[in-house]
Structure formats: structure tokens, C-alpha cells
């Protein structure tokens, strides 16, 4: 019985380590980017250029402001969503493939991982995004920014600056202390 114990422990250790070895061999997984704040591209429309960073979907919503009043009404949201889908549907077949959606997202005024993620728009994972699926995602995202009347204020689409990475300093860079005015110089 005592001789079997080391063999059992060795077998258990090997079994526990096998997923680690298998993962190390197959490290060819693609990087999955999580949704984040959109950086405004330099050649974007004037409404977006007034903001440095936009909330997820902010650049798309700002492009829906047809009358340039700084507000996206429910009607503008509806017509903008329809227009965005028609633009994204490059082959005009009434549905989006993953590449069509990613190309469309790349042409938006912001770099926005939220809109470039095909899985977000395809909840049933059939690899096809219908207009209804597209509309539902845009409508769900819009609810994060709409007021009680269903209006989105473009000014409210500004995203906060990201928090500094761990170990980064806030404030002015380190250096010699500033001269003190009126200090004694013995």
C-alpha cells in the first residue's frame, strides 16, 4: 500500500499539469479584445472632434445627429440605425457577415472595440447578423446614454480618461523641486 501512494501522487501531479502543457503547445489563440472606450480619429466629424474620448458606441451615435443640434432624438436613432446597417451591408444581401461588420466598424469615426465585436451583434451565433439583431444591440447600447425622453446628448458621450496603469505616476514628472521664492540662502 505504501508503494502505491507515490505512484498515485505522481499520476495525480501529471494529470493536473497536463492542461498547462497542452496550453503551452497551442499558444496560437488570437487575442480577444474587450469592449473599451473609443478614441476619436483625427479625421472625424466636427461633433466628435470636440471630444477626446467617447463612450462605447459614442462615435456612431454622434453620427446620427442629422440636424446637428447636439442631440440624438428617438427618430434620429431609428433612422441612423437603419442607415448604419445599410452602410455596413456592403453586399446588400440584407444581413451582415463578420467581415462586413468589422469593416464597417473600422470606418467609424472612433476606434471602438464594442462595435467591432461580431459576437455582440450575433446572439444566436449563426454567423449572420440580421437588421433586427443589429437594431437590438444599438438600441440596448443607446439606453445607457438616453435621458427620460429617449434623447442622447452628444456632450454626454465623452468618456473619462483611463486610469493610469499600475506603477504609473499621476501628476507632474519627477524632477528637481521648484525654486522656493523667499527662501533663505545662507
Image: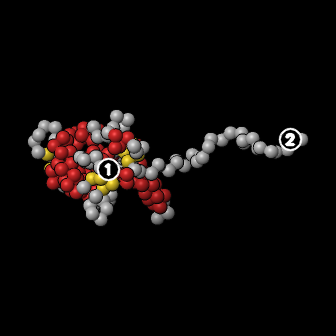
> Relative to 91, is 163 above or below?
below
The circle on residue 70 is 1
Tell which of 172 and 128 is nearer to you: 172
Residue 140 is situated, as x and y percent measured from the top left of the image, at 26, 58
Residue 14, can we see it? no
Q: What residue is shown at x 15% (from left), y 50% (from top)?
A: 131
Q: What percent of the width, then of the height, locates residue 125?
A: 20, 52
The residue wearing badge 2 is 185
- Look at 52% across and 47% down and name the residue there: 165
| Residue 15 visible at all | yes
- Please provide percent x and percent y for residue 130: 15, 50
Colour mode? secondary structure
Q: CA distance from mark 1 to mark 2?
A: 57 Å
Q: Are marks 1 and 2 in contact (CB under 8 Å)?
A: no
Q: Position of residue 13 (x, y in %)?
A: 45, 54
Who's the residue at 18% across and 45% down the image? 83
**For numbered disc 1, what is the local secondary structure?**
loop
- Name above or below for residue 133 compared with residue 116: below
Helix or strand or loop: what does disc 2 sit on? loop
When asked about the image quadrant of residue 93, the answer is top left
Q: Which circle, 1 or 2, is nearer the viewer?
A: 1
Label 2 packing within 10 angstroms: few (<14), some (14-19), many (20+): few
The residue that appears at 42% across and 55% down in the rendered structure is 16
Q: Badge 1 local density, few (<14 within 10 Å), some, or many (20+)? A: some
Quick check: 126 left or right of 180? left
Amino acid at each position: 500500500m505504501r508503494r502505491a501512494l507515490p505512484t498515485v501522487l505522481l499520476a495525480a501531479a501529471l494529470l493536473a499539469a497536463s492542461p498547462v502543457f497542452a496550453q503551452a503547445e497551442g499558444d496560437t489563440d488570437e487575442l480577444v479584445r474587450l469592449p473599451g472606450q473609443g478614441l476619436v480619429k483625427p479625421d472625424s466629424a466636427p461633433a466628435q472632434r470636440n471630444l477626446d474620448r467617447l463612450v462605447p458606441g459614442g462615435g456612431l451615435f454622434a453620427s446620427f445627429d442629422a440636424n446637428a443640434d447636439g442631440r440624438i432624438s428617438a427618430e434620429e436613432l431609428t433612422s441612423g440605425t437603419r442607415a448604419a446597417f445599410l452602410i455596413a451591408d456592403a453586399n446588400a444581401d440584407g444581413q451582415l457577415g463578420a467581415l462586413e461588420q468589422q469593416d464597417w466598424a473600422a470606418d467609424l469615426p472612433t476606434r471602438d472595440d464594442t462595435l467591432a465585436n461580431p459576437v455582440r451583434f450575433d446572439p444566436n451565433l449563426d454567423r449572420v447578423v440580421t437588421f433586427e439583431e443589429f437594431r437590438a444591440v444599438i438600441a440596448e447600447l443607446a439606453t445607457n446614454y438616453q435621458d427620460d425622453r429617449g434623447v442622447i446628448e452628444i456632450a454626454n458621450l465623452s468618456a473619462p480618461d483611463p486610469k493610469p496603469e499600475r506603477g504609473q505616476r499621476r501628476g507632474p514628472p519627477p524632477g528637481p523641486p521648484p525654486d522656493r521664492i523667499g527662501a533663505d540662502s545662507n
